[in-house]
Structure formats: C-alpha cells, structure tokens
Amino acid sequence: MTERLEQAEERALIRSAQRGDLAAFGRLVANHQQAVYNIAHRVIGNRQEAEDVAQETFVKAHKALTRFDPQRPLAPWLYRIATNTALNWIKRHRRETLLSEEVQLADTAPSPESQVIASEAANRLRAAVATLPDNYQAVIELRHFQGLSYQEMSEALGVPLSDVKSWLFRARRRLRKVLTSE
C-alpha cells in the first residue's frame, strides 16, 4: 500500500506530469491505482478485466491530463474516468455476450421449456434496459447487476445522491412500463 500524497505534493506532481514528466505521472498512478482498480472491480466483478479497465483509465487520464486543472482534487476526476471506462466496457461486453448467446442458441438443440422462458425474459429485460438513456442504464447496471449501494453509485457516477435515487426511480418506472406493455 502506498502512502497518500499531501495535496500540495500531488498538485506539484500533476503540474510536472502535465509538462511530460513520466516519473511524476507514475507517482500519481501509484498513489491512486488501488482505488481505481477497486472501482473497476466493483463495477465489472472480474479481477483480470478490472485490471485492464484500471490500466485503460490511466491511459485515458494521461492523454487528458493537460486539460486537468491542478487546483482541483485529482481523485474524483480519476474515479469518474474509471467508472465511465468500466461502464463502457460493460456495454461492449454485453453486446459481445448477446451475439455469442445468439450463436450458441442457433447451434444447440432446443432446451427445456423453462430455460426458453427464462432466456426470453432475460432477453426482454436486456432489450428494455438498452432502450433507456445512458444514465438510467448505468444506475440499473450498478444497482441491480453489480449490487452497489446508492452512495457507491453516487461516487462512481460523480453525481449527487439525489440524482442517483431519481434516475433509479425513473429507470424502474420506464422498465415496468416497457415490460408490461409487451
């Protein structure tokens, strides 16, 4: 575990990294890597993939660092990048999973009726979630598929707790409406 940097030291490292000092950026990474990994792991739920997302987070942060204001705290900015990167990974992975499931269904013999019904319900739910705005998809994913608390969701998305609760309420209402109208 690395020691936490003092605010003034972190600001100096940010300024140095913005000027191209890779060692300074490396110290910033070392200081925040565990927290970024933890966010990615909570959202994705897989160690290896969370490591990949954490690495991608720092690559994105490095590319955007020149636009970052060193007077602001670095952690929330990094955590937002980590959350968005993890959510984008889930979207990509979900599409890949849906495609592979379609191929598997086409290649296998018909399954028992209960499995077909469950599969159809899951497909309907996935399709209904996919119709929601991105922020609603994110709260549904984080709450119901990843099991995050409201506070964790607020931190991960970088929005107030009241927004998380409102979005989740509205997302559930929309899903209920879509699923009961079919």
Image (spheres, rainbow, N blue to C red):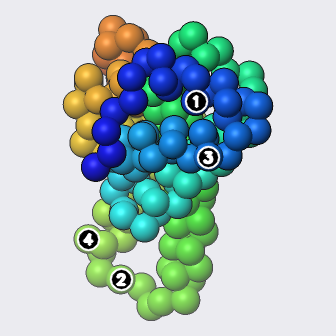
| Label whose residue precedes the other's in the sequence (1 or 2) | 1
Q: Are dots 4 and 2 in contact, CB under 8 Å?
A: no
Q: Residue at x 46, y 60 (%)?
A: 51
Q: Nearer the viewer, mark 3 or mark 2?
A: 3
Which element carries disc 4, helix, strand or loop? helix
| Label whose residue precedes the other's in the sequence (1 or 3) | 1
Is 8 placed above or below 179 here? above
Q: x, y (%) of residue 20?
A: 76, 38
Number of the label disc, if any, that sits on residue 23? 3
| Label whose residue precedes the other's in the sequence (3 or 4) | 3
Q: Residue at x 38, y 11 (%)?
A: 160
Q: Which residue is mark 1?
A: 13
Q: What is the three-letter code of the residue carrying label 2?
A: Ser
- The 10 Å Cα crowd at callout 1, few under 14, some 14 to 19, many 20 or more, is many
Q: Nearer the viewer, mark 4 or mark 1?
A: 1
Q: Which residue is mark 2?
A: 111
Q: x, y (%) of residue 43?
A: 38, 46
Is 9 placed above or below 106 here? above
Q: x, y (%) of residue 91?
A: 56, 49
For residue 115, side relative to residue 127 (left or right): left
Which element carries disc 3, helix, strand or loop? helix
Q: Nearer the viewer, mark 3 or mark 4?
A: 3
Is 117 placed above or below 86 here? below
Which element carries disc 2, helix, strand or loop? loop
Which element carries disc 1, helix, strand or loop? helix
Q: Nearer the viewer, mark 1 or mark 2?
A: 1
Give the alpha-carbon distance from disc 1 to disc 2, as whole Å.
Answer: 58 Å
Give the alpha-carbon distance from disc 4 to disc 1, as whole Å.
Answer: 58 Å
- The 10 Å Cα crowd at callout 2, few under 14, some 14 to 19, many 20 or more, is few
Residue 15 visible in the displayed image: yes
Give the alpha-carbon distance from disc 4 to disc 2, as whole Å.
Answer: 8 Å
Give the alpha-carbon distance from disc 1 to disc 3, as whole Å.
Answer: 9 Å
